[in-house]
Amino acid sequence: MNAEFTQVFELTPSEKLQLLEDLWDSIAQVPEQIPVLDWQKEELAKRKAAYLQNPNSGNSWEAAKERIRNGQYGT
């Protein structure tokens, strides 16, 4: 473990969550610096093509959240 970061592990769970949120927010400010791997680009292209062939095949975000909450991950 990097000694420079040991204090992070002494934070309360609430403080750790806030730190994570702050880190994600700082990353989101520079999206052009986040690498997208070739396999990720290929997967995105595949999914976009499938969507364009059948735009009604997906689910709304609300329906997806409901399935996840009900434990129906793959259905």
Image: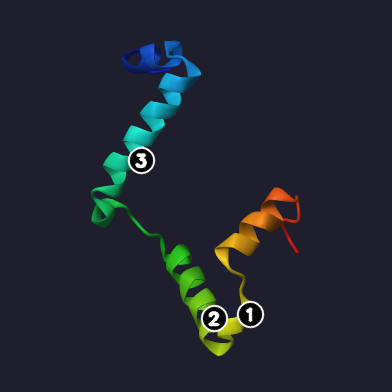
Amino acid type at image mark 3? Trp
| Amino acid marked by disc 1 | Ser
Q: Residue at x 44, y 10 (%)?
A: 10
Kindly identify which residue carries mark 3: 24
Distance in Å between CA atoms under marks 1 and 2: 7 Å
**Cα–Cα span, label 1 and label 3:** 31 Å
Q: From the image, which quarter does the N terminus lie in?
A: top left
Query: In this figure, which residue is indicated by the disc labeled 1?
Result: 57
Q: At label 2, which amino acid type do we have? A: Tyr
Calculate the distance from the C-alpha at mark 3 to the C-alpha at mark 2: 29 Å
Establish if 26 lies above or below 35: above
Above or below, 46 against 69 in this view is below
Graded by Cα atoms within 10 Å as few (under 14), some (14 to 19) or many (20 or more), the crowding at tag 3 reads few
Marks 1,2: beta carbons within 8 A: yes
Residue at horizontal 42 percent and vertical 14 percent from the top:
11
Circle count: 3
Residue that label 2 marks: 51
